[in-house]
Structure formats: C-alpha cells, structure tokens
Amino acid sequence: GAGVSQSPSNKVTEKGKDVELRCDPISGHTALYWYRQSLGQGLEFLIYFQGNSAPDKSGLPSDRFSAERTGGSVSTLTIQRTQQEDSAVYLCASSLLGRGSEQYFGPGTRLTVT
Amino acid sequence: GQQLNQSPQSMFIQEGEDVSMNCTSSSIFNTWLWYKQDPGEGPVLLIALYKAGELTSNGRLTAQFGITRKDSFLNISASIPSDVGIYFCAGQRSGGGADGLTFGKGTHLIIQP
C-alpha cells in the first residue's frame, strides 16, 4: 500500500530564498509530524498536526519556520530566508488517531542551502 | 530539548554475532520505540513497547521497556548483512500521539563479512 511520500526528494537553494517542502501522509492517518535530521544526528521534532490544527509547535527552531495542513491530509513546511544551518533532511511521519506512537516515516527531503 | 542517551554510537561486528544496544533517559516515557534507518530512507518502525517491563520480539529482534520507564534495550540475534544500518530509539511521553517522539542519536551497525 502507499506509504508517506515527500517532495521534492532533494532541494538545493541559495541562502536567503524561501523553500516549501511537501508531505503526503498515509491515507486515513489523522496525525502528521515533521522532524529534522542533521548530519550524524538523531531526529529533532519540529511540529505536530492533529487534523488541520497544530497543537504542538514547540519544536519549530525560529519564526522563519512555519507549517500548514489542509483538508486533514497534505502538509507543507515552509522555511523563509533560508540559512546554511537549515541544511538537513526534513522527515515527515503520520500515524493513526490513538496509535500516535506508531509513526510511519516518509523518505525525507534533503535540503542544502548554499 | 530532551535527549535520549543511546549507546553504543557504533558497532563493528562479525556476521552471525548477536548485537545489543540501549537507551536511557533522565525522565519517564510512556512508550518506547525502535527504528532502523537505511541510507537515503526514512526510519522504519521495528518494535513498539507500551508497558513497563514489556518484552517484545519481532523475528530476530527483541526489545524491552525498562521497569523504571527510563530505559529500553534492543537485541538482534545472529546478525546478517541486511541488518546494517542506523538504529534509533525513540520515546513518547503522552499516549495517543499528542506529542512528537524524542530520538536518541542512533547506533550505527556495521557488519564485517
């Protein structure tokens, strides 16, 4: 069956430009999560959506980061005025309501800011 | 934010050997999970643990949720070449997915033929 998909798979951008990353969760999964993975590091939680609302934005590293989810499905993570330290793999995960611990991950978007 | 202490950071073993890795935390988690990540892929869930003291197996993998709820271990028996990858532990404080997972920094497993 279809898993979590993310696009683009790779993105190279110049410092100062805005980028948008997309996540398509598993059909029927109401919860959606964004994580960031820097080279050689574990995953850092960014934001969580339940349906279209984001009760937990605590992990967003700065106000340059924002995310939205529409229709309880697709989500976009936007990074404005990108900096070199934003370079990382951005991973999206989704889970069933009530089974939120079992998060299923997409392949990630590798962002490189030059 | 809260970090899990995962060890060892890397392991070099011979094919057929057993593997053991663990995670500890200074705070309590209600759920412990173990993921494996291959290069260029997202993490794949191996085992989920929901109760303190729980011991769960998935093929050659066995994981336990520590009694104190502050630690977990993962064992892999009779390792094979496809076990190569990075293994992450992850903890979640609340049930139902109401917050994100906290991840360890990973154990890089390398198998020498």
Image (cartoon, coloured by chain):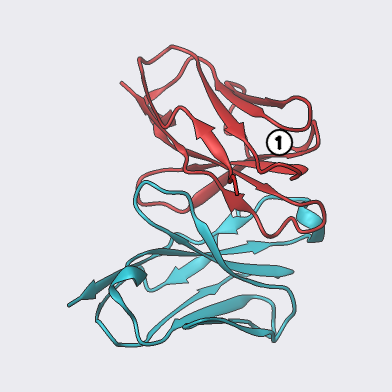
Chain colours: A red, B cyan
Could you tell me which quadrant the C terminus of chain B lies in? Answer: bottom left
Q: Nearer the viewer, residue A1 or B49?
A: A1
Is residue A65 visible in this depiction of the protein? yes
> What residue type is disc 1 on?
Lys
The reply, left or right, for residue A59 in relation to residue B83 is right
Mark 1 burial class by Cα count in 10 Å: few <14, some 14-19, many 20+: some
Query: Which picture quadrant has residue B37?
Result: bottom left
State the image coordinates of residue A13 (x, y, percent, origin top left): 37, 18
Query: Which picture quadrant has residue B69?
Result: bottom right
Q: Nearer the viewer, residue A39 or B44?
A: B44
Element assignment for label 1: loop
Which residue lies at the image location 64% right of the left edge and 83% below the top edge? Answer: B66
Q: Is residue B49 above or below residue A4?
A: below
Which residue lies at the image location 35% right of the left edge and 68% below the top edge? Answer: B9
Total marks in image: 1
The reply, left or right, for residue B82 in relation to residue A95 is left
Q: Which residue sits furthest front?
A: A1
State the image coordinates of residue A99 (x, y, percent, origin top left): 76, 59
The reply, left or right, for residue A30 in relation to residue A86 is right
Q: Which residue sits furthest left?
A: B113
Q: Chain of mark 1?
A: A
Q: Is residue A13 above or below residue B69?
A: above
Q: Is residue A95 above or below residue B71?
A: above
Which residue is labeled 1 in the image?
A57
Is residue B27 visible in this depiction of the protein? no
Q: Is residue A86 above or below residue B70?
A: above
State the image coordinates of residue A37 (x, y, percent, origin top left): 46, 44
State the image coordinates of residue B28 (x, y, percent, origin top left): 70, 70
Which residue lies at the image location 71% right of the left edge and 36% below the top edge? Answer: A57
Q: Nearer the viewer, residue A89 or A9?
A: A9
